[in-house]
């Protein structure tokens, strides 16, 4: 019920943002227009000659979501900005992102462990609850607070390199320090939660999840890492193109729920699960790192670089200019 209510609120808030409902007394930028009106955001993309001025007499507003080309340009700028940060700042922002995603992963596993009856009677609903509770909130925190998430950097920093806005050593610096920061943040959270006994009732469940993640074949872990970060970087890409919190939250919640519910593998979320499991009777962190984090990280990189950054570079960036200039359509 809580999931349905939350999704309904997101939909209603998105609709209100899309039509730009105004309270009484707030007039638009043109005189003679009623103070309460419906203004579809897509009107800004309709040529003035093709739209009805009597129905769409509005100019100069910011749509809640940029068009794909503008979103691509924004991602390039964001990647360039991240790559130009000094290593200590990247590391500190990475620690914060590790904490944020880690607490989301902890919430997801704890919620799943708390509904054994639903798991037995309706496993599909249990997976949906697992996907919805925790991980979307963790990623929303990283997207709105400007922290450094390694998995997101595989896309936005990579596309800045493809557009020759940064150098290769800047990409490597951003990846390495954000990855280390994420690991420190998530690991610290695992130790802190263990000491505080926050998840004592579900510690065995988290340790069991950690053990199951190390049992996957290497290739399967890579494949699940690819599927995961294709969705995560897509969510990050859309979120950075959104102008308001509701639009960002809608994109992140819906997309991240898919990856978490389907059991895909996210390296930063696993940076919490592995250490917490090791501290609570699960496999050692070294074993977890070798058997899970390495293949999952490889898969996450492939998805961010190839399936999102390179694909958008060809579709909307300079990589596809030759194709577009040669088109006769």
Image (cartoon, rainbow, N blue to C red):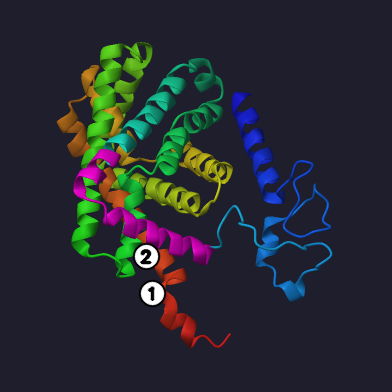
Per the rendered image, the range of residues in magenta is: 68-93
User: Is residue 79 on the magenta stretch?
Assistant: yes
Camera sees residue 294: no
Asked if 42 appears above or below 268 in the picture, the reply is below
On screen, residue 52 versus residue 203, left or right, reads: right
Q: Position of residue 197 (x, y in %)?
A: 31, 11
Residue at position x 62%, y 37% from top?
10
Q: Position of residue 70 (x, y in %)?
A: 50, 64
Residue at position x 33%, y 26% from top?
209
Q: Quadrant of the C terminus?
A: bottom right
The answer for how far apart the CA atoms under marks 1 and 2 are is 8 Å
Residue 101, image quadrant: top left
Q: Residues within 10 Å of mark 2 (few under 14, many from 20)?
A: some
Residue occupied by mark 1: 319
Residue occupied by mark 2: 310
Q: Position of residue 233 (x, y in %)?
A: 41, 50
Asked if 225 appears above or below 188 in the picture, the reply is below
**Could you say which is closer to the camera, residue 34 or residue 45?**
34
**Could you say which is closer to the camera, residue 144 or residue 61?**
61
Q: Residues within 10 Å of mark 1 (few under 14, many from 20)?
A: some
């Amino acid at each position: 019920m809580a999931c349905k209510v939350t999704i309904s609120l997101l939909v209603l808030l998105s609709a209100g943002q899309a039509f730009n409902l105004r309270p009484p007394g707030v007039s638009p930028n043109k005189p003679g227009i009623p103070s309460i009106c419906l203004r579809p955001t897509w009107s800004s993309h309709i040529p003035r000659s093709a739209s009805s001025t009597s129905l769409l007499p509005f100019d100069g507003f910011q749509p809640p979501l940029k068009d794909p080309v503008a979103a691509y340009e924004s991602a390039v700028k964001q990647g360039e900005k991240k790559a130009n940060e000094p290593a200590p700042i990247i590391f500190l922002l990475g620690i914060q992102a590790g904490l944020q995603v880690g607490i989301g992963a902890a919430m997801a596993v704890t919620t799943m462990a708390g509904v054994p009856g639903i798991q037995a009677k309706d496993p599909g609903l249990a997976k949906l609850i697992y996907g919805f509770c925790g991980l979307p909130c963790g990623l929303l925190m990283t997207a709105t607070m400007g922290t450094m998430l390694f998995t997101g950097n595989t896309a936005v920093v990579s596309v800045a390199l493809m557009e020759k806005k940064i150098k290769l050593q800047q990409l490597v610096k951003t990846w390495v320090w954000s990855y280390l920061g994420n690991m420190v943040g998530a690991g610290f959270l695992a130790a802190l939660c263990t000491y505080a006994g926050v998840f004592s009732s579900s510690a065995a469940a988290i340790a069991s999840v950690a053990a199951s993640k190390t049992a996957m074949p290497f290739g399967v872990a890579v494949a699940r890492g690819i599927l995961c970060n294709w969705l995560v970087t897509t969510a990050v890409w859309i979120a950075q193109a959104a102008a308001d919190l509701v639009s960002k939250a809608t994109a992140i919640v819906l997309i991240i729920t898919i990856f978490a519910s389907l059991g895909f593998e996210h390296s930063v979320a696993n940076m919490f699960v592995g250490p917490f499991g090791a501290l609570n009777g699960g496999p050692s962190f070294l074993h977890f790192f070798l058997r899970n984090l390495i293949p999952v990280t490889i898969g996450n990189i492939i998805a961010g670089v190839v399936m999102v950054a390179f694909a958008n570079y060809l579709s909307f960036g300079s990589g596809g200019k030759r194709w577009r200039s040669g088109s006769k359509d």
